[in-house]
Amino acid sequence: MPSLREALIELVRGAGQVVMGYFRRLKESEIGHKGKINLVTEADLKAEEFIAGYIRERFPDHSIVGEEGAKEQGSSDFLWLVDPLDGTTNFAHGFPIFAISVGLMRRDEVVLGAVYDPVHDELFIAERGAGALLNGRPIRVSPEEELERALLATGFPYDVHESEEDNLDFFAAFMHRAQAIRRAGSAAIDLCYVACGRFDGFWELKLYPWDVAAGWVIVEEAGGVVTDLSGGPLDLWHPNPLAANPTLHGKMAEVIAGVRRARTG
Ligand code: IPD
Ligand code: CA
Ligand code: CA
């Protein structure tokens, strides 16, 4: 029986191979819609099938929740949160930013997480209390303390065409304060890039547990702070995350609070 950590590495790398078999080779018939602008491809489905099968075989008493519907209710304290392909829109367009993101919870806490970017062969992994690694090397959040010098990341929810809560006012406020903002299209990679200092901060609304579970523990183990947008504890089941180093985190929370005050006042 592999250790949980070994198993996690094997399953994200294995799923990486599965999705790369489809990358830039997807047929029209292999792309479907879950919503107006929310895609699902054969690669998402096959990668989740691979991951869920791997966990069921080796850890039959563990629970599983996967974005594409994998569900298992086990008798143990362990729950795997699986995003088999984070960045499906990018993937479907041949844009090479996407990842496999898997977090493992024990009772109420994410204890282990891995994000694997198969295009760049980058594996981010963290275990609670044991630090965060990128391809085996320890990583840290950036030391940047000034918003004016910060490269930030964000994303937009799939209901952006319909909902008024669309992130555009936060985006405008940060655009006027930060050095620049990127919308790379994979929340899991955004979090990992905060963890290794490529991005200085990240915020987003209306994410799902599988988008953030792994990245959350990776950022915290790299010395970063992850909260909800108000600076309170992140609700893993309805995540609106704000992640950065401790100083920038406070400054970003102030910008967000300012936008919210402007909305009501
Ligand atoms: C999406 C990506 C994207 C974010 C969306 C997510 P998916 O995940 O992480 O960056 O902006 O909100 O839903 O659908 O590609 O797994
Ligand atoms: Ca996702
Ligand atoms: Ca996904």
Image (cartoon, helix red, strand yellow):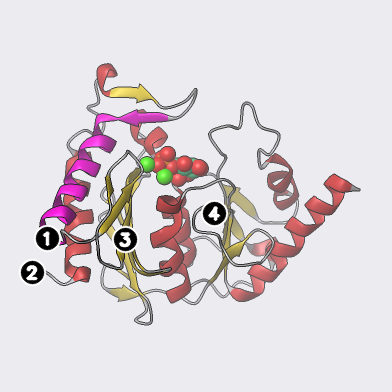
Residue 11 lies, in percent from the top left, at 19, 56
Residue 98 lies, in percent from the top left, at 36, 45
**Alpha carbon separation for disc pair 3 and 1:** 14 Å
Read off the magenta span.
39-59
Whether pointer 1 and pointer 2 mark residues with C-beta atoms closer than 8 Å, the reply is yes
Q: Which residue bears the numbered disc 4?
A: 239
N-term-proximal mark, 2 vs 4: 2
Q: Residues within 10 Å of mark 1 (few under 14, many from 20)?
A: few
Quadrant where the image shows the N terminus: bottom left
Q: Which residue bears the numbered disc 3?
A: 79
N-term-proximal mark, 3 vs 4: 3
Q: Which residue bears the numbered disc 2?
A: 1
Q: State left or right for residue 223 relative to residue 66.
A: right
**Alpha carbon separation for disc pair 2 and 4:** 33 Å
Q: Which residue bears the numbered disc 1?
A: 58
Q: Can see residue 48? A: yes
Q: State left or right for residue 265 relative to residue 124.
A: right
Callout 3: helix, strand or loop?
A: strand
Whether pointer 2 and pointer 4 mark residues with C-beta atoms closer than 8 Å, the reply is no
Residue 43 is covered by the magenta coloring: yes
Closer mark to the observer between disc 2 and disc 3? 3
Which kind of residue does numbered mark 1 sit on?
Answer: Arg
Which kind of residue does numbered mark 4 sit on?
Answer: Pro
